[in-house]
Image: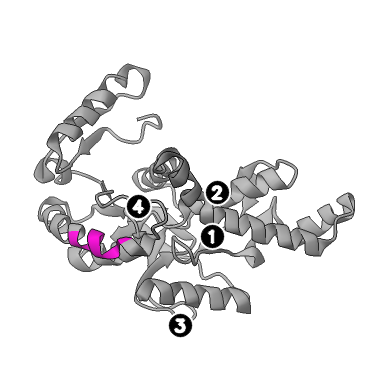
Amino acid sequence: MLLGVAREIAIVDSNVQKASGESLDLNHGISFVNPTSIYQADYKDGCQNADVIVITAGAAQKEGETRLDLIKTNTKIFKSIISEIVKYAKKEAILLVVTNPVDVLTYVTYKLSGFPSNQVIGSGTVLDTSRLRFLISQHFQGINAKNIHAYIIGEHGDTEFPVWSNAQIGGVTLEKYLKSCSNKNSKPYKEIETELKSIHEDVKNSAYKIIAAKGSTYYAIALSICSIIKAIVRNEQTIMPVSTFIDDYYGVKDIYLSLPSLVGQNGVEYFLRLDLSPEEQKLFKKSAQTVKK
């Protein structure tokens, strides 16, 4: 609505009354945003003409519960809804999975739907990457987060990690930039490295902190999903760390994990095969093993 991306937004929910209420609430603010048709729908009306189908159904993550703890419950839910979606969805539709654990459930969606892997994508670490860039920008002289090019990859969860070896600020490698900062601030580079590890931990724990404070995450995840939808609908060919199907990358195969990927009207065109450091390779394989358990 705010970005002017969608002409229509159909809300499908097993709780029809809630879906109707949500659509009515949104429609009441339509004069303040771009003209959009918003309505409660069943699977047929909601899916048959949709370019992007966003799947958010599932049990909510509870305080102290890991994303992987949700697998059994949400897989059962997905088995019931994916069959309804594919019954009516057009063959070129993009299925965007948001429900956690997103990597596992995106793979489940891929298998259940029969859609090509490029058309089934997960929200992945798009939000985690935004959190990382925000924290770096706040920690090091308030740099605009848009000028920070660093990615969180792997599982969207406890084994995700930042690719420091490929990170850049304004076209300069992060290591070179931070060494320059350490010279200016008389702060040893080793101390800065310790601070980076702290930033990584803050990224991993961000969702848990918000859940403990207010019960669930809402706004930043919504913004990240909107950015993915915009990249698809407008064919922006944007590099985003969505959860994508990996055929073979450092020996990791037949799995959905987050890697920087080119996103456009066909979903994921391809993922970037980053040159990971030996330690990052180990972390990536560990992340894959965790998701496959």
Colour theme = one colour
Q: Which residue is mark 3?
A: 251
In the image, is 4 to the left or to the right of 282? left
Measured in 3D between alpha carbons, the distance from the residue under mark 3 to the one under mark 4, in whole angstroms, is 31 Å
* Residue stretch rendered in magenta on the structure: 70-76
Place of residue 41 in the rendered image (x, y in percent of width and height, measured from the top left): 13, 37
Say whether residue 72 is magenta: yes
In the image, is 36 to the left or to the right of 232? left
Dot 4 falls on a residue whose secondary structure is loop
Name the kind of residue labelled 2 in the image.
Arg
* Dominant secondary structure of the residues highlighted in magenta in the image: helix
Name the kind of residue labelled 3 in the image.
Gly
Q: Residue at x 21, y 38 (%)?
A: 11
For the N terminus, the image quarter is top left
User: Toward the viewer: 76 or 44?
Assistant: 76
Q: Which residue is mark 2?
A: 131
Place of residue 94 in the rendered image (x, y in percent of width and height, measured from the top left): 27, 53
